[in-house]
Each structure stands twice: as structure tokens, then as C-alpha cells.
């Protein structure tokens, strides 16, 4: 379209302001005009029709002209834009004396002036510098209006923010102060196409030329990303000249309650000027003005969403040099240790902590990912610090000496983990020249030994960084509430100086086999398990993600219904579970190869039949070849994938950012979201081709078990110290598996899945609901046997529902014997239901059955169309269920194995020990084991009728269900269980020990695993019960204390003192008794020393708290309020929040809002008083319990030698018999 196509009336008053502003902003840029006047032009392309309105505007010191050549649009108009005949190019001019400060209201004159200005502008490329007569018209028009101030037109608020951002970023880069910008209260801007408007004023002495102000992009598109129809976010994909690719995500819900006041910098305030926006967000306080009205959709009126970002670098552990293994992981750690711009080691984490944020990172085989989330208005400041990771990290030698200990501590966390030990054995036994032949974790030995051998570790780590941390290998994702233009400007400013590099494509040849064929590796397990692990090497299938041939085969090999391998092996009593497919871990899903794994958990009988089991696996594979790939099965998977994509639930912002960033490494930009769900192309030949790789000669066999024959040649894996035996598989078996002579008739393909939903209608769209104003569930049924809570979802509007029920059983926890029989009943019931539950789960209708004391918790959740069908089937089976002898034997064996494996992890063990001291009814796992061996099937069948003779059910139905549908679900319970209600006094109620005044208690226990080097200290402080009018304030104080202390604790005990990898603190709520806990896990220091360091830190907190200035204290408060008011990302998060209140019998569904409101009035003195009352000895209310778990490398004699001032608990039951208990609250 030519400029002459512009429409508009003629004539007008040159002293009046122009009208013509659109509803849709496409782009903003600048032009340099060579003429006598010094002003430049801000050009804005607008799309839509003109509108008339008046607005007050503050004074502008200089002019702004708004024009754009129409055929040079950077992107097409969004699809949602209303169609009109012409593109309006408009001019908004503003002049005034620098001394004039009074805002004026003017009437808008004829738009012909805009047309006149636009027609005088040459129709050529936007980045060219213009001069000559063609500019005369604009120059004359400009100068003729210089004496008369004009009102600023009402603009969409995205435009206001864009103008402010673009100018301020430019001037900041040039090292000049920005003289003043104020963006006042504006209407919400949710997406391109909103008609919300903003009043804003600009004070701009000049506009920087395009070449200085906005870096060019090599590619940019707002329309390339395919997203779910229910996804309201906007996406822009850009590539910078340095090679960096960025996906910008505008989330309209981040600022859906109206923008908060911009952070201020007190040093730059001027009485005669408007306060300007400090984009770093430092030194700010939250706007005290809160939106009082809740949203129509029923969400918390003041709820917030966080902003987030992630950066994935295409470099991981495959890049480790052989002489310094674990270096990529070590490099990940070092980037947190300060930069040239921000040299303090904890600056990044401290900034996030003060502003309600968090961060994490992980190193995979081929990439490293860094991600964070933060309170929305501090995104720019967090990005400023984050960007320096990739520009100028310090990698200080003294920090390296300390951080190598953190890497070592992290390794020690998994030293006794069977799956990690197996992975490392697979690496160790791979071909010497293969990239798998590495030690990916890294530890003190691999890194420090390298230094002792004369290797300059810092030079190696700097070289690794310089070789790989450049724009071509980086994928950035930013999720914010700002417009895409603002986010893009931040990317240019903050990440534009990342260096450009070249991409060296990795070798992807499979010429080198990964493993030797025909071998069986028996790995000694830490836990009491028998796991048969089969692996086949496939070519890398990344480019074939639209076909997902490997997922088709995983669906069949891992199926659990009739005809499946698992169903067959369970019937023989050989296996309890199967999982199959290509794992998400980098070693299994790389550009080099895909590893298709099959993990089979065996029974004791199955352990003796491993070769028979492998034979049946090959029988099933032969069946798949003979029947040929079935398109109807692929179509089911396709329907489920499309359904999941079309009605995708949101996840936490930092998780989503990390996922998108990682996906940018794998998928083209258009499929960065859709790629995971896509079953787009049916390719029968490809499935047949992939099946050809499932041959014995391409198979690796691992057996993880405690039962290995050590009379054979036992070898040692060097890094984990795991013992293993390598055996040859008989060649006769290899030949038999190559082509099994027969296929057992019990093996066949699965049946059609009848749980796949067909009805996706939204209930909230079809009914007028009289309780629209309620944001919490309400009780719709309260009977002696049943209490039901209900809430229709009007927030997320997806065809999903969550139905949770707690069924209190008669006498289910009355004694140790009853508790054990109830557990057996539950496990056998789940085993009986497995086929039904699995089939529904494939169709994304999930369920879970758990046991909490005497309460059986049943959850059915997911797509709601067939939810009642599944619930009916589950309850019908439960009603008439009687266990069978063969399954009883298998399940009892499985429970025995589970009990033996309990408390093998030190952190779990320490929590177990604390609860064992605090809770009255706590059945010890060792006592359970002793009793279990005496229980028979007859005992259980006698017990079940009484267990189900009386019941009490409390439930929650939340989501896409009508009230009558929720009541129908309760009737399903009634029709299946026509029993007496369980009276209140017969329901189990837990009581918690009330620790005596000034209690100082210690419990010392050795680790359960005799090879576990990690020790743990949990220092628990008991506070008060959750009762009374001060409940909310007390909770607010505890949470605020945690917010303030968490990062300094980590910085002191982990970063500086390097006590161990796990250093944390958090509130504890034990059956509604409030407490606070400090925790450290260490493989280097004994528990006595760890406790001393924790206590020393606690004693120094008073000085730290007194040293907090008002600004820092308000920042912590604001950060916590942001967390409390953070919007639930999905329906399941909201349901879980409601369910927690029901389970705890608190029923304060607005607890977070009340706590946030209480926070407003809390002063620093309140926190100091709370600290002195509950954590500072010798206060009588300072009551503490130290759980000390001693690792295998510590001296036990130190336990008794250094506890003179504390009371040691040696007999837990005796201690509880002499203790007082709080009244039961739930």
C-alpha cells in the first residue's frame, strides 16, 4: 500500500492537536532526518481505525512526530485484528517551552494534518538516513507549530510503555541520565487488540538515532510459534546479530490487576520533575494501592504471577576434557559466583531472594540450563544480573577452591543412588572413544586431582567458557508482563553484548558401538531391589519428532493392560512394574543416539527367570513385526496429544521458561511448544525400521540387585565404587531371541481405549451460577457419612476436573497390626485396579490411591468427560474386592522390600526421626517388618469386612463440573458402600508432643545404610499451635523470618563455609503445630560440628536483623506478599491449595490473602521480638529438638562426648509417655 492511500479530511487549525490513534500497535522505531533542527522522529506503525477522545497530558519539552512507510512493516498485523480497508499512518506532535509545566486540554482537530505530514515523508527503507527537499514539508510543518503546545493523544498502554522503554534504554546505554518519565495508572493491556488506553507523559530532550538506539535483528516474528487456542500469551521469536536466539513471552496475566507503581531510585528524584522509572527495580517498594475488586472469573483479586527467564547453552558434559571430568558441571556452579558488573558472589541470589524469586541450574550431556523467577516488577533487575553470567563471569580462583567442594557435596548426595550408579556403570563400560565414556557429575577427586597433575583448572574452565558460551549456542526465554517490544529492547540492551561465535556441529556418527554385545552386567544394589534394565541403541530421532515412532513402540512395550508384557509377567508372578521408552535424560536422548530403555521391577521369583523374561520381550517384539504398525493406535496417541496441547495446563513460570529454552535447542521455533505433543505424521515404514534395531546384538542387559555372586570376577566402577560382575550371555540364547520360534497366545495388542474423552464443553459457559462471587469452595453436602465441597471453575475454563476424597476407615490405624493390614489391603486393591487405572491414565484421566493413618485418599483428576465412569469402576471393584493368594504373596514381598528400603536416604531418615519423637501414634518401620512376616491371607480376609463396615467420606469436586454432577459422584459412593457412618469419636486423631519450656533435646542415630557417608542435622524449634486470633499473624511472622534468613543461611553455611550441598531452613507444620527447622547435610563434618555452626549462625541473626534498613525490610515483605498472592498456574494447583485446608480441618481457603494483609502491618521489631522469643536461648519459649544422623565416616563416640548441656533422648517411647501433648487439631 502506498502512502497516497491514506485517508483523512482536509483543512484544520494548525494550533490544535492532531487526532488519529489506533487500537493496535505493530512496531516502534526511529529515523534520523538531516535538517537544521536537532529533533529526530519516533515512528510508530498503527493498525486500526481512528477514534476521538480527549486526555490530559503533562508537558513535553520537545516534539515527537509519529510516521512510518507503510510497505515496510516488520510484521503483519495479528490475526485477531479487525479487518479494515486502509492502514492509517498518523502523526502525534507535541511542542512546548521547557518552562511550561501546566497540562492542557485541547480539542482534536482535523486529521488532514497527519496526512500532510505523512505524505511529505519519503516512501523508502526505514533504516536509511534522509535529507533533501523531500523533508521540507515536514520541517516547515514542524517549525510552524513550535509556539503552540498540543495535547498528547490517548494511546494504548502498550505504546506508552514502549515509548518510555525505548528512549530510556537508549539513554542508559549512552551513559546519559533519563530526565524523567512517569507512567500513571493505565487500563489493563492483555494482548494486541485490547482497546485499553493509557495516560502518560514524556520528558524527552532528544531521541537517539535508530542506528544507536535499536540493534538490528537477523530474524523476528510474532506469528511463528504455534500455541494452544487457550493460551493467551503472546510470543515473539528473534535472533540477534551475535547469533543469540530469544523467545519473548508476553503474559497478560502478570499485570492483569493493573500495573504496580514503578520502582524508584531516591538518588535521582527531583522536586521539579516527575519521578522516573528505575528499570532495574532496585530500592523500590510495592504500590500500596491494591485492586479491591476480585476478577470476574473468581480468582483472588490481588493475585499475582511471577516473571521468569531461562537460558540454555548448547554445551554440556559431553564437552568435558578427559583430564578434568565434570568440568561443564563445575562451570555451571562458577557462573553464580559473581561477574565484573556484580562482583559479590551472592548478588544474584540475594537480589532474587529480596524480591520473591528463586533460581536454579542444571547440566545435561549436551546443554546447560539456567533459570529463575522473580516478582514481576523486578524482572529487569534480575535480567541485568543474569545476563552477566554470559558476558563477564569472574571465575575467581578463591571461589573455585570453595565451589569444587559444593560439586563434591552434590555428587555425594547421589553416591548411594542405584539409578545414578547404573548410569555411571553404563558410562564406564562404554567404548573408550565414545562421548558416553565420561564421569559427568564431577567431584573433588576428578577436579582436584587434575590440578595436582599440573593441569591449570582455571585455564581449562575459562577455555570451556570462551569456546562455548557465545550467542550462536544460546537460547534465551523471557516471560514478562511487559509488551513484546519492551522485552525485546531489554534483550538488545542486556544480551546484545554477548560475543558472537561459530557453531561446530558435533559428530553424530554411530560407527562406534556404544557397548559390547552379548553381555550381562550384574550391579550390586544399595536398596533391596531387583531391576532388569534392557537398552537398545537407536539413531538420533530428533528430526523425526512429528512422527514419534519411538513413542509408538514405548506405548506398546510399556502397556499394562490385558495382552501386554506386564500383564503377562504379573500373572506368572515374575514382575511388579514395567516402564519403557526413550528417557528425557541427555544420555538417552542426544544428537548422537537415542537409547530406548525397558526397566522391569522383578519379584524374587522373577530374579531367577531373567533370561525367560527377555525371551518373552522378544516374543512381543516379533508380534509387533508380524502384525505391522497399526494406524488406529497411532491415531489414539495423536488424539491424546492434540487434546493435551489444545487444553494444556500452565506450569510454574520458571519451569515453563526452562522447558521452552530447552525446546529451542531441539525444535524449530514454530514447534517450541507443539513439538512435545505432535503426532502429526503417520509413517509405518519408519516404525518398521526402528523395530529392526530391537535385536539381541544391539541390546545391553543390566541387572541391579543385592544378590550378586561375589565368587565370580567382581569389578569396581571407579567413581561410585560400585561392585559389578560382567557375564557373557550364552550364544544359544542370543540366537533364540533373534527369532523366537513361537509367541505365547496371552500376548496381544491392547484394546481400544474407551477412556479417551469426546466432550470438551465448558460448563461455566453454559450456566448462570448464583455463586459467581465466591472464590472458595462451598459445602454442598453435609451428612453423617459424607461431606462434600464444590467449586465450579470459572478461572481456567478447561475441560478438566479434580475430585479428591478422604475415606476414613473403621479402625484402620488403631494398632500396629491394623495399620499393617490396612496397608496390605490398599496395595492389593491398587494391584487389582491397575489395568483400569492405567488405561484411563493413558487418556489423561489420572488417579491415585494413598493411605494416611486410617484415611484412604482417592484422587481422580484430569479430563472430566469420563471421570464418573472411572470412579464408578474403581468403587465397584473396591466394594467386592477379595485378595487372592498368589497376589497376596507377591504384594507382601513387595511391601517387605519397601519397608527394608525406608530411610535409606539421610534427609528422609532425619525427618522420620523427628516425627517419631513428636507424634503420639507413629508405628516404627522395624516393628512393622517384624510383624509382617506373621500375617497371612486369612488374617487380611477376616479384617477387611470390619475395616469397611463404617466409613466417613469428605471430598472436594473442583473444576469443569456442575453441582449436580458433583452430587452424582457422591451418590456413586453411597450406592457402592451402603454402610453405617463412622462416628467422630472413632476416627483417628493425631496428637503432637508439647515440648517443655526451654527444652534442649538431642536424638542421635546412625545412618541405616552402612556405606552412607552423609550426616544430617535437623534443628527443630517448636513454636505454637495453629489456633486463636493470632494464627494468621504468627504464620506471617514465621514465613517472613524464613524469607529474610534463607539466603544468608545458604550464603554463610554453604557458599562460604562449604558445610555441605544441602543447607536450608523452612517452617514446619506438624498436624497444625507450627515449628521452624534448620537443616544441613554433609559428607565432610560430623553432626556435632554441624549443629555448632547452625547455632552460631542463629545467634548472629539478631545483629543481622537489626542491621536491616527499612528499604530492605520492605523488600522482603513485598517479596513474600508476591509469593502468597501468586496466581495458581493451573487448576490442580488451586485444587491442592483448597484440599490442604480441608485435610487440615482449617477451612481457611483465603489463608494466603489474609496472611498477605497481615504482613502489611508487621514491623521489623515484630520479627526481632519473634526471634528473641522462639529461637534465642534462654527464652522459656525457645524449645528445640536436634536430630543428629551420623554418617558411616564419623566417630560415634563424639555423640555422647559433646551433649552435656542438652537432654539426650535414648528411649523415644519412654520420652513420649512422660510428655504432655497438644490437643488434636486435625
Image: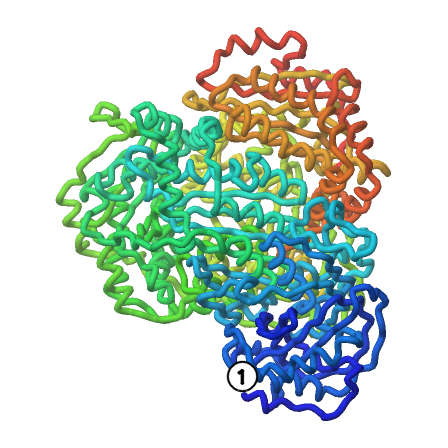
- The residue indicated by pointer 1 is 123
Look at 72% across and 68% down and name the residue there. 62
**Which of 1089/421 is in front?**
1089
**Which of 380/597 is in front?**
380
Horizontal side of 958 relative to 345 (left or right) equals right
Look at 64% across and 54% down and name the residue there. 176
Q: Residue furthest bottom?
A: 10
- Residue 819, position as x, y percentages in the image: 59, 33
- Residue 30, position as x, y percentages in the image: 59, 70
- Residue 548, position as x, y percentages in the image: 36, 63
**Which of 237/963 is in front?**
237
Horizontal side of 894 relative to 36 (left or right) equals left
Scheme of image coloration: rainbow
Q: Can residue 443 be seen?
A: yes
> Which secondary structure, mark 1?
loop
- Residue 537, position as x, y percentages in the image: 26, 51
**Which of 514/286 is in front?**
286
Query: Dividing the image into 4 quarters, which one contains the C terminus?
Result: top right
Vertically, is 721 above or below 881?
above
| Quarter residue 1176 falls in | top right
Q: Can residue 868 be seen?
A: no
Look at 48% across and 11% down and name the residue there. 1195
Horizontal side of 1032 relative to 430 (left or right) equals right
Horizontal side of 1111 relative to 31 (left or right) equals right
Vertically, is 1144 above or below 835?
above
Amino acid at each position: 500500500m502506498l502512502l497516497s492511500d491514506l485517508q483523512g479530511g482536509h483543512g484544520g487549525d494548525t494550533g490544535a492537536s492532531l487526532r488519529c490513534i489506533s487500537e493496535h500497535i505493530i512496531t516502534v522505531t526511529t529515523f534520523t532526518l538531516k535538517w537544521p533542527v536537532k529533533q529526530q522522529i519516533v515512528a510508530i506503525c498503527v493498525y486500526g481505525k481512528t477514534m476521538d477522545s480527549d486526555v490530559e497530558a503533562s508537558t513535553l519539552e520537545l516534539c515527537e512526530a509519529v510516521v512510518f512507510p507503510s510497505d515496510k512493516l516488520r510484521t503483519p498485523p495479528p490475526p485477531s485484528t479487525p479487518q479494515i480497508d486502509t492502514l492509517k499512518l498518523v502523526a502525534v506532535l507535541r511542542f512546548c517551552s521547557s518552562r511550561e509545566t501546566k497540562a492542557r486540554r485541547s480539542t482534536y482537530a482535523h486529521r488532514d494534518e497527519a496526512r500532510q505530514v505523512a505524505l511529505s515523508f519519503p516512501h523508502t527503507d526505514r533504516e536509511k538516513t534522509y535529507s533533501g527537499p523531500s523533508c521540507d514539508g515536514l520541517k516547515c510543518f514542524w517549525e510552524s507549530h513550535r509556539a503552540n503546545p498540543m495535547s498528547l493523544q490517548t494511546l494504548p498502554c502498550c505504546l506508552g510503555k514502549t515509548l518510555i522503554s525505548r528512549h530510556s534504554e537508549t539513554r542508559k546505554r549512552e551513559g546519559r541520565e533519563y530526565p524523567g518519565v512517569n507512567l500513571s495508572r493505565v487500563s489493563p493491556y492483555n494482548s494486541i487488540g485490547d482497546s485499553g488506553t493509557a495516560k502518560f507523559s514524556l520528558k524527552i530532550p532528544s531521541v537517539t538515532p535508530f542506528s544507536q538506539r535499536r540493534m538490528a535483528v537477523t530474524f523476528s516474528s510474532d506469528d511463528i510459534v504455534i500455541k494452544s487456542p487457550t493460551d493467551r500469551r503472546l510470543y515473539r521469536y528473534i535472533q540477534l546479530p551475535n547469533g543469540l536466539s530469544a523467545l519473548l513471552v508476553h503474559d497478560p496475566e502478570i499485570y492483569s490487576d493493573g500495573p504496580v507503581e514503578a520502582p524508584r531510585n531516591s538518588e535521582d528524584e527531583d522536586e521539579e520533575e516527575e519521578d522516573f522509572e528505575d528499570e532495574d527495580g532496585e530500592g523500590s517498594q510495592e504500590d500500596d494501592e491494591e485492586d479491591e475488586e476480585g476478577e470476574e472469573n473468581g480468582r483472588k483479586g490481588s493475585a499475582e504471577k511471577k516473571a521468569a527467564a531461562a537460558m540454555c547453552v548448547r554445551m554440556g558434559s559431553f564437552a568435558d576434557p578427559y583430564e578434568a571430568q565434570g568440568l561443564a558441571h563445575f562451570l555451571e556452579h562458577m557462573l553464580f559466583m559473581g561477574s565484573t558488573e556484580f562482583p559479590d558472589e551472592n548478588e544474584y541470589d540475594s537480589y532474587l531472594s529480596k524480591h520473591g524469586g528463586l533460581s536454579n541450574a542444571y547440566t545435561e550431556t549436551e546443554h546447560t540450563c539456567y533459570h529463575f523467577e522473580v516478582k514481576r516488577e523486578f524482572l529487569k533487575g534480575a535480567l541485568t544480573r543474569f545476563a552477566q553470567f554470559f558476558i563477564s563471569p569472574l571465575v575467581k580462583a578463591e571461589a573455585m577452591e570453595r565451589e569444587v567442594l559444593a560439586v563434591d557435596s552434590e555428587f555425594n548426595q547421589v553416591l548411594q543412588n542405584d539409578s545414578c550408579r547404573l548410569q555411571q556403570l553404563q558410562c564406564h563400560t562404554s567404548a573408550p572413544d565414545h562421548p558416553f565414556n565420561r564421569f559427568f557429575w564431577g567431584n573433588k577427586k576428578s577436579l582436584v586431582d587434575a590440578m595436582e597433575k599440573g593441569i591449570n583448572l582455571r585455564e581449562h574452565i575459562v577455555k570451556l567458557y570462551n569456546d562455548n558460551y557465545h550467542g550462536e549456542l544460546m537460547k534465551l526465554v523471557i516471560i514478562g508482563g511487559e509488551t513484546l517490544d519492551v522485552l525485546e529492547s531489554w534483550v538488545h540492551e542486556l544480551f546484545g553484548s554477548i560475543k558472537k561465535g561459530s557453531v561446530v556441529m558435533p559428530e553424530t556418527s554411530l560407527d562406534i558401538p556404544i557397548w559390547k554385545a552379548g553381555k550381562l552386567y550384574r550391579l550390586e544394589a544399595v536398596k533391596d531391589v531387583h531391576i532388569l534394565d534392557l537398552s537398545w541403541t537407536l539413531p538420533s530421532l530428533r528430526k523425526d519428532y512429528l512422527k514419534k515412532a519411538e513413542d509408538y513402540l514405548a506405548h506398546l512395550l510399556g502397556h499394562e493392560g490385558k495382552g501386554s508384557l506386564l500383564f503377562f509377567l504379573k500373572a506368572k508372578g515374575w514382575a511388579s512394574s514395567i516402564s519403557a521408552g526413550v528417557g528425557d535424560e541427555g544420555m538417552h536422548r542426544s544428537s548422537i543416539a537415542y537409547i530406548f530403555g525397558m526397566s522391569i521391577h522383578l519379584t524374587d521369583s522373577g530374579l531367577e527367570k531373567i533370561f525367560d523374561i527377555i525371551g518373552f520381550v522378544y516374543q512381543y517384539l516379533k508380534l509387533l513385526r508380524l502384525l505391522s504398525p497399526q494406524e488406529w493406535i497411532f491415531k489414539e496417541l495423536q488424539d491424546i496429544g492434540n487434546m493435551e496441547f489444545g487444553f494444556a495446563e500452565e506450569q510454574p513460570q520458571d519451569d515453563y521458561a526452562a522447558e521452552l529454552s530447552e525446546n529451542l535447542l531441539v525444535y524449530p521455533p514454530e514447534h517450541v511448544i507443539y513439538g512435545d505433543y505432535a503426532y502429526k505424521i503417520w509413517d509405518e515404514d519408519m516404525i518398521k525400521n526402528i523395530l529392526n534395531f530391537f535385536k539381541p546384538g544391539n541390546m545391553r542387559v543390566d541387572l541391579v540387585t543385592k544378590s550378586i555372586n561375589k565368587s565370580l570376577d567382581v569389578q569396581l566402577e571407579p567413581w561410585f565404587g560400585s561392585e559389578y560382575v560382567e557375564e557373557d550371555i550364552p550364544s544359544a540364547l542370543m540366537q533364540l531371541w533373534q527369532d523366537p520360534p513361537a509367541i505365547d497366545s496371552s500376548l496381544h495388542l491392547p484394546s481400544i481405549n474407551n477412556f479417551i474423552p469426546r466432550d470438551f464443553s465448558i460448563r461455566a459457559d453454559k450456566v448462570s451460577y448464583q455463586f459467581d462471587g465466591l472464590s472458595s469452595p462451598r459445602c454442598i453436602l453435609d451428612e453423617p457419612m459424607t461431606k462434600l465441597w464444590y467449586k465450579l471453575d470459572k478461572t481456567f475454563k478447561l475441560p478438566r476436573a479434580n475430585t479428591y476424597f478422604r475415606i476414613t476407615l473403621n479402625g484402620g490405624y488403631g494398632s500396629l497390626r491394623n495399620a499393617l493390614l490396612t496397608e496390605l489391603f490398599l496395595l492389593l486393591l491398587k494391584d487389582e485396579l491397575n489395568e483400569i487405572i492405567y488405561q484411563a491414565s493413558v487418556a489423561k484421566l489420572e488417579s491415585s490411591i494413598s493411605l494416611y493413618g486410617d484415611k484412604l485418599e482417592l484422587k481422580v483428576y484430569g479430563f472430566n468427560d469420563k471421570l464418573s465412569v472411572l470412579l464408578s469402576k474403581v468403587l465397584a471393584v473396591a466394594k467386592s474386592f477379595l485378595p487372592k493368594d498368589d497376589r497376596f504373596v507377591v504384594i507382601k514381598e513387595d511391601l517387605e522390600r519397601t519397608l527394608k528400603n525406608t530411610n535409606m536416604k539421610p534427609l528422609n531418615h532425619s525427618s522420620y526421626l523427628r516425627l517419631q519423637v513428636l507424634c503420639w501414634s507413629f508405628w516404627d518401620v522395624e516393628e512393622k517388618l517384624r510383624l509382617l512376616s506373621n500375617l497371612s491371607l486369612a488374617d487380611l480376609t477376616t479384617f477387611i469386612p470390619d475395616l469397611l463396615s463404617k466409613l466417613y467420606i469428605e471430598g472436594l469436586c473442583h473444576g469443569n463440573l456442575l453441582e449436580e454432577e458433583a452430587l452424582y459422584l457422591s451418590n456413586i459412593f453411597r450406592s457402592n458402600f451402603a454402610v453405617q457412618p463412622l462416628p467422630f469419636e472413632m476416627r483417628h486423631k493425631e496428637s503432637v508432643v508439647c515440648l517443655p519450656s526451654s527444652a534442649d533435646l538431642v536424638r542421635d542415630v546412625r545412618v541405616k545404610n552402612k556405606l552412607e557417608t552423609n550426616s544430617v542435622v535437623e534443628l527443630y524449634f517448636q513454636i505454637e499451635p495453629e489456633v486463636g486470633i493470632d494464627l494468621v499473624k504468627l504464620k506471617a511472622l514465621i514465613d517472613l523470618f524464613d524469607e529474610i534468613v534463607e539466603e544468608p543461611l545458604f550464603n554463610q553455611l554453604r557458599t562460604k563455609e562449604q558445610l555441605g550441598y544441602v543447607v536450608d531452613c523452612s517452617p514446619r507444620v506438624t498436624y497444625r503445630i507450627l515449628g521452624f527447622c534448620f537443616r544441613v547435610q554433609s559428607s565432610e563434618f560430623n553432626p556435632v560440628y554441624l549443629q555448632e555452626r547452625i547455632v552460631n549462625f542463629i545467634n548472629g541473626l539478631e545483629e543481622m536483623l537489626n542491621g536491616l534498613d527499612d528499604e530492605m525490610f520492605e523488600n522482603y515483605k513485598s517479596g513474600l506478599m508476591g509469593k502468597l498472592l501468586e496466581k495458581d498456574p493451573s487448576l490442580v494447583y488451586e485444587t491442592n491449595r483448597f484440599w490442604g485446608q480441608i485435610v487440615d480441618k482449617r477451612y481457611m481457603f483465603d489463608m494466603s490473602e489474609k496472611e498477605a494483609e497481615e504482613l502489611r502491618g508487621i514491623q521489623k521489631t515484630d520479627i526481632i521480638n519473634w526471634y528473641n522469643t522462639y529461637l534465642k536461648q534462654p527464652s522459656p519459649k525457645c524449645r528445640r529438638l536436634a536430630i543428629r544422623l551420623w554418617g558411616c565416616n564419623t566417630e560415634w563416640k563424639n555423640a555422647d562426648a559433646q551433649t552435656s548441656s542438652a537432654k539426650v533422648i535414648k528411649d523415644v517411647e519412654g520420652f513420649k509417655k512422660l510428655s504432655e501433648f497438644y490437643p488434636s487439631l486435625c
